[in-house]
Image (cartoon, rainbow, N blue to C red):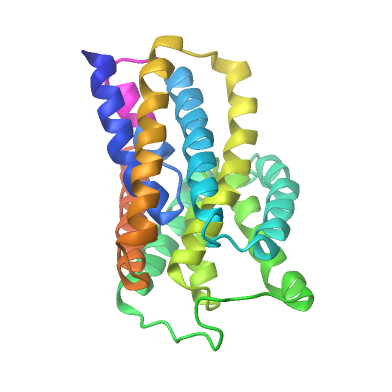
């Protein structure tokens, strides 16, 4: 029964998260742990489910041209370079203070997602990025997101997607592109985490199928049912949720 509950939670979480481009690990890890699963196995499983769900979602988005690869690759490279640097620097900076500051940033970003009216880009949904913008916009976004992710031990997707929208990327394109980026960052996190905690094969067996179905359902809604405005609002709600969890961890611990 507990495995069926884990599968249900996974399906719901993935259905929502693939729409926003963010991984669902921040939901699934505490959920699995609350169900009685080992913490390290919960972390490994949640990251693996991110990899699987984002792979299916990215394939679905790529078929209709929602992923901007010119924008995503410099961000991915920068994230991979700066994440270890952030992890090393975490030894010297109080994590609790950083969590509080990042939570405040997410609250600001979420409010902008919901209340700020994005100016229409001159190219509409055919947003493109040139070589100069790759160096001056995409690379700094990836570098900052990777550094903060390594510093706090969190996913960088929650920082990347609001910044993409702020620079004019339409919300649906920003979410799809971030999903592609999160696939690589989750894969790296999973490979590092699985060596520490191992895997719960039964938990994976039940939740992987749920993650795939959730990813396909969420990507279907994103492609055919949701407007840019709806995606922005949903992203804002998710960012509020992440901020709330961080503030809870900050004040409880």
> Which one is in front, 238 or 7?
7
Q: Residue at x 30, y 44 (%)?
A: 248
Q: Main secondary structure of the magenta part?
A: helix
Q: Is residue 30 visible?
A: yes
> Which quarter of the figure is the N terminus placed in?
top left
Query: Magenta includes 52?
Result: no
Q: Residue at x 64, y 26 (%)?
A: 191
Name which quarter of the figure residue 39 lies in: top left
Across and down, in percent, residue 106 comes to 41, 61
Across and down, in percent, residue 197 comes to 54, 15
Q: Residue at x 44, y 68 (%)?
A: 171
Farthest residue, direction left: 1
200 w.r.t. 31: above or below: above
Across and down, in percent, residue 18 comes to 41, 48
Name which quarter of the figure residue 113 lies in: bottom left
Q: Residue at x 77, y 71 (%)?
A: 135
> Which one is in front, 14 or 226?
226
> Which quarter of the figure is the C terminus placed in?
top left
Farthest residue, direction front: 63
181 w.r.t. 174: above or below: above
The total number of labels drawn is 0
> Which one is in front, 250 or 147?
147
Q: Is residue 249 visible?
A: no
Specify whether 136 is left or right of 152: right
Across and down, in percent, residue 172 comes to 44, 65
Q: Which residues are magenta?
A: 29-38
């Amino acid at each position: 029964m507990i495995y069926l509950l884990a599968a249900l939670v996974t399906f719901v979480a993935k259905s929502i998260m693939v729409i926003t481009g963010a991984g669902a690990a921040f939901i699934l890890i505490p959920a699995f742990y609350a169900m009685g699963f080992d913490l390290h196995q919960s972390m490994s499983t949640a990251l693996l489910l991110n990899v699987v769900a984002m792979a299916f979602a990215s394939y679905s988005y790529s078929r209709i041209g929602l992923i901007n690869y010119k924008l995503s690759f410099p961000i991915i490279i920068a994230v991979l370079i700066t994440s270890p640097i952030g992890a090393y620097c975490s030894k010297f900076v109080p994590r609790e203070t950083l969590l509080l500051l990042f939570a405040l940033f997410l609250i600001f970003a979420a409010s902008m997602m919901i209340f700020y009216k994005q100016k229409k880009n001159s190219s509409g949904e055919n947003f493109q990025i040139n070589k100069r913008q790759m160096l001056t916009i995409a690379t700094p976004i990836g570098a900052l997101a990777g550094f903060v992710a390594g510093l706090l031990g969190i996913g960088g997707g929650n920082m990347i997607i609001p910044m993409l929208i702020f620079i004019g990327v339409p919300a649906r394109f920003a979410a799809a592109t971030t999903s592609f980026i999160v696939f690589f960052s989750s894969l790296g996190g999973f490979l590092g985490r699985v060596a520490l905690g191992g895997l719960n094969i039964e938990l994976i067996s039940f939740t992987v199928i749920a993650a795939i179905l959730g990813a396909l359902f969420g990507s279907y809604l994103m492609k055919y049912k949701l407007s840019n405005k709806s995606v922005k609002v949903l992203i804002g709600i998710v960012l509020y949720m992440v901020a709330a969890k961080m503030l809870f961890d900050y004040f409880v611990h």
